[in-house]
Amino acid sequence: MKKTIMLMAAAVIASAALMPTKVLAQKLGHINSQEVVALMSERDEAYTKLQAFGKELQETLNSMKSDYDTKVKEYNEKASTWNESIKKTKEDEINSIIQRIQQFQSQAEQDFTARQNTLMEPVMKKAYDAIEKVAKAQGLAYVLDLASGALVYIDDANTVNLLPLVKAELGIPASKTQPTQIQ
């Protein structure tokens, strides 16, 4: 077992020593794509639209809940004066409202996620296109996205932080370091 490990280690060292210098000297770049996207005005526009859509969904849900509250209040106040068939009808109405609320909540979550994906897809594409353009212009062989969590150590002296360059490519002011706060 020890011999196998030693042979494998020797093979790795030997193959690294035989690699052309060009392969070993490839330039690396790094960027946090989430940071770039967060600074883009298109992201702000997408989130504004998404918030408006979410508000519409919430208002519809609130209306449904208000209808439910009204029916429950009426039931609690008048149930003692109703005969069994009226009670049953009112209970069925309340149960129907509960089912509609649950169905609406489920569909609203799906619709919200779909709208978010639709609004953010062009923003993400623009960001990644800019990253690719800057990486090519810088002659980089690799760009590591810090947002994915795949990198645990970075030596800034041996890589290029693309954030300032991509911000310039996208027309984001160099002084903008925080996303716009949307209310």
Image (tube, rainbow, N blue to C red):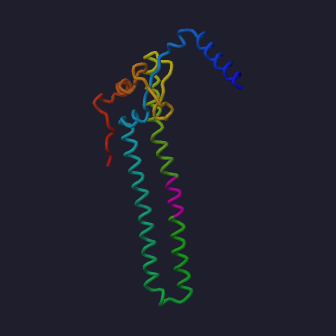
Q: Look at the picture and state if 52 lies above or below 93.
A: above
Q: Which residues are magenta?
A: 102-109
Q: Main secondary structure of the magenta part?
A: helix
State the image quarter where residue 175 is shown.
Answer: top left
Tell me the quadrant of the picture where the N terminus can be found.
top right
Residue visible at 51% across and 74% down in the picture: 94
6 or 75: nearer the viewer: 6
Q: Is residue 101 magenta?
A: no
State the image quarter where residue 169 is shown.
Answer: top left
On the image, the x and y values in percent for residue 173 come to 30, 29
175 or 151: nearer the viewer: 151
Q: Look at the picture and state if 102 lies above or below 93.
A: above
On the image, the x and y values in percent for residue 112 come to 48, 50
Q: Is residue 108 magenta?
A: yes
On the image, the x and y values in percent for residue 103 come to 54, 62
Q: Look at the picture and state if 129 lies above or below 109.
A: above
Residue visible at 53% across and 90% down in the picture: 83
